[in-house]
Each structure stands twice: as structure tokens, then as C-alpha cells.
Amino acid sequence: MLKEKYPDRIEAIFAKYPDRRSAVMPLLYLAQEEYGYITDGALVEIGELIGVDPTQVRSIAGFYTMFREEPKGKYWLQVCTDLPCALRGAEEFYQKLLAELGVEDGGTTADGLFTVERVMCLAACDKAPVLQCNFHYYENLDMAVIRELIAGWRAAAAAEAAASAGQPSGDGDAG
């Protein structure tokens, strides 16, 4: 439960808002960070924390596209493919990315690391193809760059998994 695992973070969030109900968005981010998406249990817990019905929390989470309402990959790759970006090669880039990861539109890789989706407007038309990964922007992309990024994300996930299993990451770092 969030309140048991992150009491200090939750209190810091509440300290910013005179009305606890106003803390719903940061609490949703915290839940998504913890669970990977907004679970039904998280909706109930956030509702209890801020004193509203979970259906009100769900309505807020459902309105904003940055909140995931179902499991996604550890790395949520969103490529803008609207017209201005498509004119700069975004659609072709998106199709190559899907092929590179072996997924369909909106799909998640078999290892659960990557979910790839098309989105409309990441507000960087002049820097297309542009991708947002877990709310971090990557611009002026080509397949060489995305392959490097994917390799880095895979290595980071492997190191994180090794660390949580109490094993050395194998990166040669002694400290």
C-alpha cells in the first residue's frame, strides 16, 4: 500500500495543497510509479487518502492520457504520428520501431519491457520523428539512435533486476 511504503512522500505531497483533494494528480503519479499503472486498489487507496469516492479518482485518471489504466511495458514508448510529424518521417519510423521490437500497434514486447503506441501531438513537430518514453522526450530520431536507446533501456532493466535479486549487475563497476 502506498501509505505504508511512502508515508513521507505522501505527507510531502499533502503539504503542498491546502485541500487534500487537490493532491489527486501527484498521488496518481505515485501509484503509477509503484504499480506500473493505476490499479483498482490504487483508486480506492487514493480515494481514502483524499476523502473522495474511488469513482471520482477514476474519472480523473481516465480523463488524462498520462495515466495508464492497464498494464504497460516498463518503458512506454509513444511516437507522435500526426500529420506534421508524418511529413517528417514519423509514420515510417513508427512502423520500423514496431518491427524492431516485434510488436503490433499498441503492443507490448514478450519480455514486458516495451509498449509501443502512436499518439497525437507531442508538441515537437519540427523535431520529428519524436518519441516520449515514460514522459521523457527524444527528438530527431532515426533507427540507429532508437536502437542505442533500446539497448540502454534493456541494460538498465537488467541491472535493476540483478540489483533487486541481490546479484552484481555485470557492468564491471565495483562500487
Image (spheres, rainbow, N blue to C red):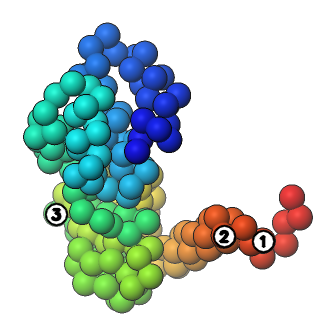
Element on which disc 1 rests = loop
Q: Which residue is mark 3?
A: 83
Separation of residues labelled 2 and 3 (CA atoms):
45 Å
Tell which circle, 1 or 3, labels the residue nearer the N-terminal end.
Answer: 3
Residue at the spot 34% in from the left edge and 71% down from the top edge: 115
Number of numbered discs overlaid on the protein picture: 3
> Hey, what amino acid is under mark 2?
Ala
Looking at the picture, does residue 126 appear above or below residue 105?
Answer: above
- Disc 1 to disc 3, how far (Cα)? 46 Å
Splitting the image into 4 quarters, where does residue 109 fall? bottom left
Give the residue type at disc 1. Pro
Of circles 2 and 1, the one toward us is: 2
> Looking at the image, which is closer to me, 121 or 6?
6
Nearest to the observer: residue 132 or residue 158: 158
Residue at disc 3, secondary structure: helix
Residue 51 in which image quadrant: top left
